[in-house]
Image (spheres, rainbow, N blue to C red):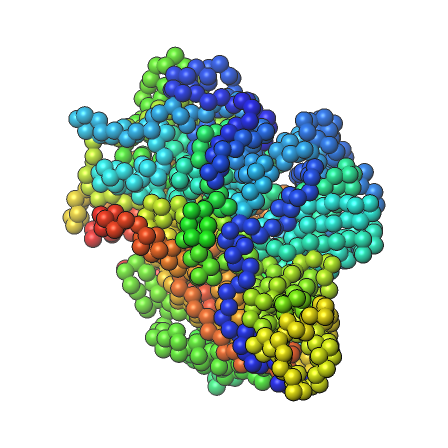
Amino acid sequence: MKFETAAGDNPIDRGKVVGRATPRIDGPLKVAGHATYAAEWHDQSNLAHGYIVASAIAKGRVNSLRLEEAKWAPGVITIITAQNAGTLGQAGPNAAKLLGGPEVQHYHQALALVVADSYEAARAAAALIKPDYTRADGSYTLAAVTGASKSDGILGQPGDTALGDFAGGFAGAPVQIDATYTTPDLAHAMMEPYATIASWDGDRLTLHTSHQVVDWARRDLAKTLGMPKDHIRIVTPYIGGGFGGKLWVRADAVLAALGAKAIGRPVKVVMPRPLMFNNSVHRPATIQRMRLGAGHDGALIAIGHEGWSGNLPGGDSEGAVQFSRGLYAAPNRMTRNRLSQLDLPEGNAMRAPGEAVGSIAVEVAMDEMAEKLGMDPVAFRIRNDTQVDPEHKEKKFSQRQLVECLQTGARKFGWDRRNARPASRREGDWLIGMGVAAAMRGSPVLRSGARVRLVAGGRVIVETDMTDIGTGSYTIIGQTAAEMLGVPLNWVTVRLGDSNFPVSSGSGGQFGANSATSGVYAACVKLREAVAARLGIDPAKIKFAGTKITGSGKNVTLASAAEAGELTGEDTIDFGGIRQQRHQATFGAHFVEVGVDIHTAEIRLRRMLAVCSAGRILNPTTARSQVIGAMTMGAGSVLCEELVVDPRFGYFVNHDLAQYEVPVHADIPHQEVIFLKDPDPESSPMKAHGIGELGICGVGGAVANAVYNATGARLRAFPMTVDKLLEHMPVPG
Amino acid sequence: MRAFTYQRVATPAEAVAALAAHPGARLIAGGTNLLDHMKLQIATPPHLIDINRIGLDQIETIPGGGMRIGALVRNTDLAAHPQIRRDYAVLSRAIVAGASGQLRNMATTGGNLLQRTRCPYFYDTNLPCNKRDPGSGCSAQGGYNRDHAVLGVSSACICAFPSDMSVALRVLDAVVEVMGPDETSRAIAIADFHRVPGETLPVQEFALAPGEMITAVTLPPAPGGWHVYRKVRNRASYAFALVSVAAIIEGTGGAEKGGRIALGGIGTKPWRSSAGDAAIPHGAQAVADALFAGASPTDQNRYKLLLATRTIAAVLAAAKG
Amino acid sequence: MPNPALTINGQPMGFAMAPETPLLWALRDGANLTGTKYGCGVGDCGACMVLIDGAAQPSCQITLAEAEGRVVTTIEGLGAEGPGGSHPMQRAMLAEQAVQCGFCTPGIIIAAAGLLARDADPTDAEIGAALTNLCRCGTYPRLIRAVRRAGTEMRRTAAPVESMIR
């Protein structure tokens, strides 16, 4: 099915299943401990365990791995290294090799895999390996290399954009803000580490692994291992979080495959947590300069946003500046995205890449400007709203409800109780402040396929290689099929995460929910046609409701359609036309109240509210989960999360979950989410948008603005930890 | 984890005998620290002696005043003990401020006293660390040291001592009872139990002699006063202290009240001084000036001086009520 | 000391594994009880929580040797006697939809079960302090409600006299 024009009325509009708050159908399995994650396919006999040996240096060469002692350690079967692994390819998304040596490209790069009979034996033997290295000088400090940066495109968009005359517009603006913000390197820190069980059957490879996009895993493994894609099967039905960190094949998958091939037995590789931070990928740090020029009436005259980030050669930039490109109106505009070379571990996509951290700089700068103008920050944002893409004025937004989000949120949150004068509200030892920020996140879609089977009894089976990384894919796909075929949700079985199923979009970039359910919609349309043909009903008249089929004078059960044998509908949705003619994005507004201890500068969240507009909300329960989770992650990124670089050794120092501080239970207070829910016919047949990443955009800015309102301290280097905030605090009276 | 032999003992006497018989052996109780170090090969003992079933798990009232806490009393049980909560509230509060409920179910009184540092360089065997590998150097100096100590530091080591419980024990003037290889006992004042690193190696962290085992901690008669444990951290729970203040303030409402005060998070051991205690009637700045005499902060952790001063002020203000 | 034996989910179980093996690996690789998860291996994340003699503890921080003779309950065995073979906390997690990717879920249920066994009426602050399990999906507010809901159910089913004494 090709989606090219705005969707008309369709069966999804009935809203009997889709759009209803529905408990996730994978829940019972998960609370019972029976969901099988990657490392849990123990039906395979003779499983061996692999342990990764990782580089102790950040850059240089391995002179000798010195494997002798480990080779003869108890339980060791073999040791895989670059020397005995054969020629390996390198997939496009991987900037560094997944099996390094003799050249070392980053700290904790995998250099070997010890394969042994047990995990403890493999780990003990791996610890015996003390390679001999020659260190080389590397570049590890972003601020030191911004001078040597180059313009870098952002996901097919240009690195630099300009409209009007930014320099002139800014210089002539009566009110100006020129401020520089920094965001740190951030870790996905998903709870399930990378893990793979690999097994070979002749020249066919099966990987039980943890991956967000099955088809990309196959493609990239085929390239890396030099084998045909169709000889690889990927199985990944349950995934313990991804957040972008599982978009690409990592060392566990490649090394498990190599190990299993070498010993002729299945091999399991779980990446140890201390390697997760330097072996894999992270969100790169940014330096961002914001220049805003406005008139006294509050209209923006000029917006300039420059961003710098670094990566290994071949890696991408963190395109923070894209957040500025579509959000606010201003006649004179400029964005510049700059990439420098660093020898830190590889930077890559993490939840709302670019936009999550770009929004922090933009939305704090907006707060600074509102204050300078003497305007309310909500009113200032509304004043600068636009209904056309500010860089491409011929392009309308398919749906843009930013103003409604801001207004609704201000009302619900009690924004009118905010005192604009900083540090003016105190309760006991707490300084209380409120902050607001706008949220915007692009809403891309990708080609996505599915197969829907009508089987005996009228039961329905959906099969697609779509993944559920905690997002709720199982449930919304089941809801889609149930709606399309007029059955209750419990008549539908959803099977995901297997490359034997039709290729889907996978999960990532906030494209999964809209794309994959649209693919299921397309397959259901095919199945409905097949049912119509079998029953001799006019396909234009056929209706599926209440497990019955009606049309052309017939009224039969759905089960009867399957009596002559299973019927299957399979299709792939493709997007074009209206999708290209419109700017497709989701919008929201974040409101945050914080308390800051007047003595110690400890920041504690008190209330959070997000108002979100993302087309039809397919399932308010799972959508809400996505938004509150993203709010939590976004708050962490400005309050406590930071990968600390030691530029002497070129690595992230705090590489465990004790020292990389993600928010804990006690950090997260009352959170509320309001959805506007209006369907967007120009987005897809589902009239929906993704929502998984909208919630992280802007929230960090809202927290920072609340801290300013509470204390009068404007921090521009994130996270806002006590060591930074304390000296700017008002003196306790 | 490197292979090791394992032995379970039934009495304290068997434990010290086993220690004497196995050079390099380590005692294991809660295991919340040692086992992690073994997995990361920070510690590689050839022999483990499991003392979880040797008793020493009672909390007793000492006739004439004071309490005796067995070395194997779990943190959860100690913090919840009614008499500890009533008479030694600073201890109960300090324990609850540390780690997580589940770790406190495992962690023991003796083990908590022996907590090792959380310095990230200590935890990564690829990096120099004098505490882990004497003579290799101190990576924290010149590296990441925002969380590190400003007091009791040396060129060999600047890591902060992480135990919350020990800071409270310091302010309570607790005494650590240990048993030696010949089953003789001796008592070590808490002030002497934790040691600051000298300029020479290896870094001695504890006053335990080889072959000695902690058997109990005794608390002097209930000190009275107003007890507080205030722990400052970026995350709202489950993080080590940037600064912590354990204090017992005598009298309430008066300006010249006395008391005792110990600091955590800022020293290589729990930090307290008679000058600091004496300065309490003169206010937070005076206390901080006394305690931080001779402080040696880095550019990254200099904030701890101001933070400690402010936290002490908050505690004194709260005591004033 | 060959084949350390312990009671797991009501069944005596021996392990042909080295006694220094962390209980976590014995459960997962030996007993094929994979509901107990590896998240960090050093007690930081809480994904491997089990009940040992009724108290919640990370199974990565206790060896098979130390666990000998103890009574261990994993997520698979929790609430085996309850309606539908489930514990009130498992039902509450579904009722409040406090599950996302599900990887931290078993450890959180165990930690909450351990808390509620001691105190079926904890305050929100007590819940927040007791459940330091990390959840990167961010289910925290729903978890608080789930623990409260499970506690309510447990108080209702507990002997009335007992609840009055509390």
* Residue at left offset 63%, top offset 70%: A458
Residue A269 location (% of width, % of height): 67, 43
Foreground residue among B155 and A450: A450
Residue B161 placement, left or right of A392: left
Q: Residue A528: which quarter of the image?
A: bottom right
Q: Residue A463: which quarter of the image?
A: bottom right
From what the image shows, is residue B276 above or below residue B252? above
Question: Does any portion of residue C28 appear in the rendered image?
Answer: yes
The quadrant in which the N terminus of chain A is found is: bottom right
Residue A43 location (% of width, % of height): 66, 44
Residue A456 location (% of width, % of height): 66, 66
The quadrant in which the C terminus of chain A is found is: bottom left
Residue C90 location (% of width, % of height): 45, 53
Question: Does any portion of residue A357 appear in the rendered image?
Answer: no
Foreground residue among A284 and C69: C69
* Residue at left offset 36%, top offset 37%: B75
* Residue at left offset 83%, top offset 54%: A228
* Residue at left offset 36%, top offset 14%: B183
Q: How many marks?
A: 0
From what the image shows, is residue A375 above or below residue B245? below
